[in-house]
Amino acid sequence: MSECLSFFVPGEPRGAGRPRFIRATGHAIDPPAAVSYKAMIREHAQAVMGDRPVMLTGPLKLTLVGYWLKPVSWSKAKRDAAVWHTSTPDWDNIGKIVCDALNGIAYADDAAIACATVTKAYGPAYGIWIQLEQLT
């Protein structure tokens, strides 16, 4: 039976920001907003993992669904018709920040993710639903 991990992270979904490079040392530094968002994802993942001693191994499937609120400035007709969130952040940046945040917690390295789906939609509250499954 394959292992599965799924949880919800409340708050507006963020994408991975562009790292800043220090020429003198050659090091890259993540933006502070990205660092705090990764920490929040890690906290939720660790709460769901609980006392589980082993991380997920083998090929993994990642499913992400980001939810945004519909702007109140839109007309009622436009809000009723809107289903998909089509503005920033880009879907690949959302996937990148989540994958990086789960390194060393849910899996050893995000290179184990063999299949991924990222969806951006409007919902009743801001948040991101994350599901990881072992592929068999």
Image (cartoon, rainbow, N blue to C red):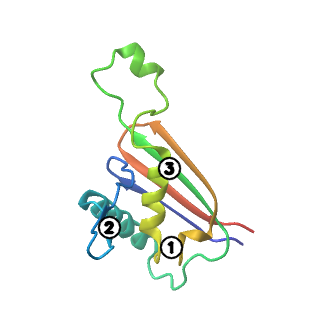
Give the alpha-carbon distance from disc 2 to disc 3, as whole Å. 19 Å
* Mark before the other along the chain sequence, 1 or 2: 2
Residue picked out by circle 2: 39
Residue picked out by circle 1: 106
Give the alpha-carbon distance from disc 1 to disc 2, as whole Å. 14 Å
Q: Position of residue 47 (x, y in %)?
A: 39, 71
Residue picked out by circle 3: 92
* Mark before the other along the chain sequence, 2 or 3: 2
Q: Residues within 10 Å of mark 2 (few under 14, many from 20)?
A: some
- Quarter of the figure that contains the N terminus: bottom right
- Left or right of residue 102: residue 58: right
Q: Position of residue 102 (x, y in %)?
A: 46, 69
- Left or right of residue 17: residue 65: right
Residue type at the position of mark 1: Ala
Q: Residues within 10 Å of mark 1 (few under 14, many from 20)?
A: many
* Mark before the other along the chain sequence, 3 or 1: 3
Front residue of 45/110: it is 110
Task: Name the quadrant containing residue 111.
Answer: bottom right
**For the point 36% across and 41% down, which residue is it?**
125
Is residue 83 positioned above or below 118 on the image?
A: above
Residue type at the position of mark 2: Ala
Is residue 102 positioned above or below 129 on the image?
A: below
Q: Position of residue 77 (x, y in %)?
A: 41, 13
